[in-house]
Amino acid sequence: MTQSDSGRPARARFSPGRMIPLAVILLAAAIGVANRDAFSFQTLAENRERLLAWRDSSYLLAAGGYVLAYVLVVALSLPGALMMTLTGGFLFGLVAGSVLTVSAATLGAVAIFLAARAGLGEALQARMDASHGMMTRICEGLRENEISYLFLMRLVPAIPFFVANLAPALLGARLRNYVLTTFFGIIPGTVVYTWVGAGLGEVFARGETPDLGILFEFQILGPILALCVLSALPIARKWFRKTGEE
């Protein structure tokens, strides 16, 4: 934190111009919510032949278009990331679909992280550093166990992707750790839903809707929860160490 001429910590100045990227994201998210039914299973089913033909005629262009669209969905916090993941599996299969989705989701998450940090992050961080309440303790815990906390935010299914993208920026997480934990933390869930997407052709042929509750079945959720426990171990170890010292 910078120091003023009087020796006191200088407050981060709020600049309305720096809020523009975040305002665009929030506006796009609101528009997306209002039109959330535009991209659905029915839309995908109705256009599946056209999409498959596009993929077959120009694979690289289709892959690039998919990545760009996914980045925009995540960066603008638009609803439809799950449908995009399923579409990735439907078009490109489990392996290629997972690689494209994880890469695109990470890029989009970095974009919203930088926009949020530029708009509110520094000013909010300065306020929390100057206070001594619960938020300060949360920030201190984040700094001490940053990678573990960020991994937990990505792995716990109950935490919305939008929240896991924004909260670290507002709490002062380091970009390098954010990118690392985002990329690896979203792999388990992405692989599961891409796998579901890879089987959508047969589902559509039967006129059915895929079971998206597969993530919460024990054989899938169990390993993810085990990863959550492993991520939390460093936090628990430091907590017990501090408790013993006290």
Image (tube, grey):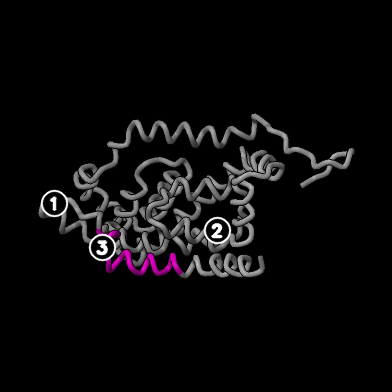
Query: Is residue 54 at least partly visible in the picture?
Result: yes
Select label 3 or label 2 by which is in front. 3
Q: Hey, which quadrant is residue 218 in on the image?
A: bottom left
Which circle marks residue 179 in the picture?
Answer: 2
Query: Residue 230 at x, y = what percent?
Result: 47, 70
**In the displayed structure image, the side of residue 137 where residue 162 appears, left or right:** left
Query: Residue 70 at x, y = what percent?
Result: 41, 49
Query: Residue 239 at x, y = what percent?
Result: 58, 65
Q: Residue at x 79, y 39 (%)?
A: 10
Going from the N terminus, do you reach mark 3 or mark 1 first? 1
**In the displayed structure image, the side of residue 219 where residue 165 appears, left or right:** right
Instruction: Report crowding for label 1: few under 14, some 14 to 19, many 20 or more residues within 10 A (C-alpha).
Output: few
| Residue topped by disc 3 | 217
Q: Can residue 128 be found in the magenta stretch?
A: no
Which circle marks residue 52 in the picture?
Answer: none
Q: Secondary structure at mark 3?
A: loop
**In the displayed structure image, the side of residue 9 where residue 246 appears, left or right:** left
Going from the N terminus, do you reach mark 1 or mark 2 first? 2
Pick out the residue farthest to the front: 246
The magenta stretch is 214-229
